[in-house]
Amino acid sequence: MDIWTIDKFLLFFAFVIPGFISIKCYELLFPGTERSSSERVIDAIAYSSMNYAILAYPIIAVEQSGTLNGHPWRSFFFFVFVFFVFPVLLVFFWRFLLTGKFLQRIAPHPTGKPWDYVFSQRKPYWVKVTLKNGIVIAGKYSENSFVSSAPSEEQLYLEETWVVNERGGFERKKNSTAGVIILAGDISYVELREYKI
């Protein structure tokens, strides 16, 4: 049986691609654990079906009205919207619902780890990292810094390292600093302070 005949390809495209786009977009917004390909295909079909369930009335209305007949560009843009644009909009709407105050009272936050939640906000911080051996590394986390996100192991790049004084305050930037990379396996805990100059 040839799965690449035109009718089977169109079925595959229609019931996998919109869901796959939704999955990839969701994973960009909420990084998480990696799943097997078979699980992804099942999820993609489910999300594509949900996409069509929501758009059922507009699709039927457009098809029955005949507004696309004889207008190839209208058809093209309509189906681009159905297959590619709406799956992305659906994810952003879902994100809006899941992170809203109302649903946060009754449902868990979709971001799996505090590490991802805090650093995904892209706020600048003064950071003090205490390593397992007791050494304290202090620095500035700002626009040129970087932090890994799930499913990758936590790593933190601070664009500047700072000298900490006896009271635990940030005294001065180290000379010729180009920053520091800190690996999760070495971290005991991380303290974040408001970024004020």
Image (spheres, rainbow, N blue to C red):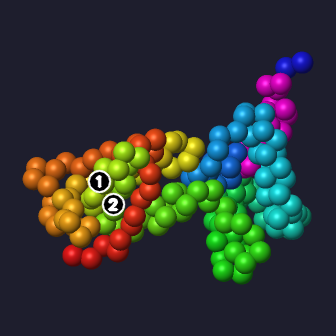
Helix, strand or loop at disc 2? Answer: strand
* Viewer can see residue 89: no
Q: Residue furthest bottom?
A: 102
Q: Quadrant of residue 56?
A: bottom right
Q: Which residues are magenta?
A: 3-19
* Mark sitting on residue 62: none
The location of residue 35, given as percent across then percent down, is 70, 39
Q: Quadrant of residue 126?
A: bottom left
Q: In the rendered view, does 29 fall on the left or right side of 123?
A: right
Q: Quadrant of residue 186?
A: top left
Give the residue displayed 16% in from the left and 50% down from the top. Answer: 177
The location of residue 4, given as percent across then percent down, is 79, 25
Magenta span has 59? Answer: no
Q: Amino acid at mark 1?
A: Ile
The location of residue 110, given as percent across then percent down, is 66, 61
Helix, strand or loop at disc 1? Answer: strand
Picture quarter with the C terminus: bottom left
Closer-to-camera residue (175/43) = 175
Give the CA distance from mark 2 to mark 1.
6 Å
Give the residue displayed 24% in from the left and 50% down from the top. Answer: 179
Closer-to-camera residue (113/132) = 132
Q: Amino acid at mark 2?
A: Lys
Closer-to-camera residue (95/102) = 102
Q: Are marks 2 and 1 in contact (CB under 8 Å)?
A: yes
Q: Which residue is mark 1?
A: 137
Magenta span has 14? Answer: yes
Give the residue displayed 51% in from the left and 42% down from the top. Answer: 153
Q: Is residue 131 above or below residue 4?
A: below
Q: Which residue is mark 2?
A: 128
